[in-house]
Image (cartoon, rainbow, N blue to C red):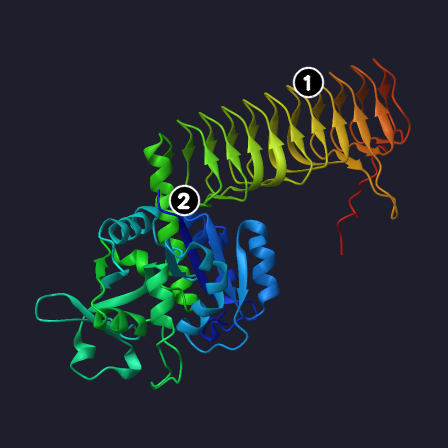
Amino acid sequence: MEQLSAIVLAAGQGTRMKSKLPKVLHQVCGIPMIQQVVRIIKAAGCENCIAVTGFKEELVRTSLGDTVQFAHQTEQLGTGHAVMQALPLIKENMDGYVLVICGDTPLIKTETIKKLISICIKNQAAATVLTAQLANPFGYGRVIRDSTGNMRCIVEQKDGSPEQLKIKEINTGTYCFKIKELIDALSKIDNNNAQKEYYLTDVFEIMIRQKQLVIPVIAEDSDETMGVNSRIQLAAANKILYLRKAEELMGEGITIISPENTYIEQDVTVGHDTVIFPGTILSGKTIIGCDCIIGPDTQLENVICGDNNQLNRVYAHDCSIGNQNQIGPFVHLRPRTDIHDKIKIGNFVEVKNSVIDDGTKLPHHIYCGDADLGKNVNFGCGTVTVNFDGKNKYRTVVEEHAFIGCNTNLIAPIHIGKKAFTAAGSTITKDVPANGLAIARTHQKVKENWVTEDTYKD
């Protein structure tokens, strides 16, 4: 198999984004654009990837880590100049091929990259150029063909004649080159153009003049080739990728009631026969099991969720949920929460840094923070684990089959034993032994005939 390298152009600031963040680090479907591009090209077989950085390169390097090598473009002198910075990292592979792609093209598919590379290798071409037909090609370089349909050159928007600018076929900025021919052609380009830049696209005219084969390959779906240069295009790219993810999951046996109103990020996995309702956002490394009902209006971020769960209007992040649980509506599960099996968590409940064992019920209006609850515990409405004294957090332990009455305050650190009860309205400050009943409230006093005819008079 031919040795494949890739150069990802990521030096630009992206002024139209109006952001202090480099353009390629804006996220699409949950990951930075450039990470998406690197994933795609590696899946296509390009293991030796070089990112050419410039604006705020330290942020780009941090984002990509050790997944790629780096070359730095000190001055932004054009795409040809950018590729030149990466040549020292591919020169050892002079007989190989290199893919050149922009870091702001996250919609391109692995199959398209494979096709572009395959055509270049099979035809022993000096280069293949990915092109697209656009109804409105403004701003893109135009692909100029001769009378026989062969490619002659690429003309940039600012350098094109009125006749050339009528052409609808555009250069997408994605190419495959034979490395030896690329290096030779790059040595012959100049900056004699309107932008005073070294255009990478000038190499094609040089190659063709030298009787080398350059093949244009038209993308089947022009959406793939869209570069993201503005917030509007970023929104359009997100819409396409979220829909692709939804279609992928539906093909695997997941029901998504309204794909256009469901947002599932790239790294999320979902088990078969799960149903996802509108308004749901699944992000990060979230894993959903089989036969679940998720949503509507549920947001899960880095959540591991087992099988047969029902989550309705839940916001959960960095926590785990077992199997056969009913959670919601209006529930907040915070980090380091571990929900086991067959648990009911009802409306207006918040759980933080707690372990809740099988069969326990937190039906409504409860705060459970820094707690360990055993099996089949029942928290009455209005129960609060009072975990913070202004300086430190303390844990509450409630053993199995304990019953906590409505409006109970459990002042941590505290331990409630097995099958113990607390009376409604109690503020519990001391441990309660197994099978015990704790009552911590004043005795009720009733004043008979306290209301008189004068009580409600002005």
Near-viewer residue (353 or 297): 353
Q: Where on the picture, by quarter, is residue 446?
A: top right
When the figure is inspected, residue 311 is found, relative to residue 29, above or below; the finding is: above
Q: Whole-percent x and y of residue 47?
A: 45, 47
Q: Whole-percent x and y of residue 54?
A: 54, 70
**Closer to the observer: label 2 or label 1?**
2
Identify the secondary structure beneath mark 1: loop
Near-viewer residue (345 or 58): 58
Which residue is outermost to the left? 147
Write down the residue under mark 1: 376
Q: Whole-percent x and y of residue 392?
A: 87, 44
Name the residue at 57% across, 56% down. Answer: 63
Left or right of 285 on screen, residue 254 = left
Q: State the mark number for residue 43.
A: 2
**Amino acid residing under circle 1:** Asn
When the figure is inspected, residue 137 is found, relative to residue 294, above or below; the finding is: below
Image quarter where the C terminus lies is: bottom right
Identify the secondary structure beneath mark 2: helix
**Amino acid residing under circle 2:** Ala
CB-based contact (under 8 Å), mark 2 and mark 1: no
Q: Whole-percent x and y of residue 428?
A: 86, 30
Q: Earlier in the sequence, mark 2 or mark 1?
A: 2
Near-viewer residue (360 or 294): 294
Name the residue at 54% across, 26% down. Answer: 306
Q: Residues within 10 Å of mark 1 (few under 14, many from 20)?
A: many
Residue 27 appears in the figure: no
Which residue is outermost to the right? 430
**CA separation in Å, label 2 and label 1:** 48 Å
Left or right of 13 on screen, residue 236 = left
Q: Residues within 10 Å of mark 2 (few under 14, many from 20)?
A: some
